[in-house]
Image (cartoon, rainbow, N blue to C red):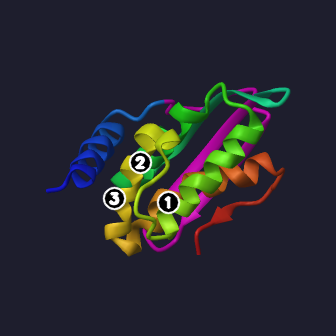
Amino acid sequence: MNELQELYREVILDHNRQPRNFGEIDDADRVIDGVNPLCGDRMTLYLKLDGKTVEDVRFRGSGCAISVASSSLMTERIKGASIDETMGLFEMVHEMLTNDADEPPDELEKLVALAGVREYPSRVKCASLAWHALRAALTGADHEVSTE
């Protein structure tokens, strides 16, 4: 097993077993639901913003290990980040998941583990669900996000 595959396996299992930032934010500024009808993943993303910064972020939902782990990794990474930084991160993760780039950018840090999902094309939507919900929440969408 190569290094990226091992990292993928370890990080996905860890974040699925012990998801970070799992729960609700009662006074969230933005709340958006996401669904992946192909896999049955469902999640709700809660954002608390402080001006142009993600002050707090949490998620609730159920789904496969990849979906839960991706949500957990995402929330861990964006807490305290600026909205601009967060949108840039969305673009980098989306590029990493959907293109066969040789090396993911170093600034993705632990998120590079998600690159392992490219080995399983049917699972890309599982990994990207939380990220699409995040982009929708930050751009003011008020409808459910679907990976369909």
Where's residue 22, x and y in %?
Answer: 49, 33
* Disc 3: which residue: 116
* Disc 2: which residue: 112
Using the rendered view, name the quadrant where residue 148 is placed: bottom right
Answer left or right for 148 relative to 54.
left
Helix, strand or loop under label 3: helix
* Disc 1: which residue: 96
Let me know if residue 31 is in the magenta part.
yes
- Magenta stretch in the rendered image: 21-48
Residue at 30% x, 50% y is 8
Asked if residue 43 is positioned above or below residue 41 in the image, the reply reads above
Residue at 72% x, 43% y is 31
**Quadrant that contains the N terminus:** bottom left
Helix, strand or loop under label 1: helix
Q: Earlier in the sequence, mark 3 or mark 1?
A: 1
Label 3 crowding class (10 Å Cα cut-off): few <14, some 14-19, many 20+? some
Where's residue 92, x and y in %?
Answer: 58, 53
Answer left or right for 8 relative to 142.
left
| Distance CA(mark 1)–CA(mark 2) | 8 Å
Where's residue 99, x and y in %?
Answer: 50, 70
| Distance CA(mark 3)–CA(mark 1) | 10 Å
Helix, strand or loop under label 2: helix
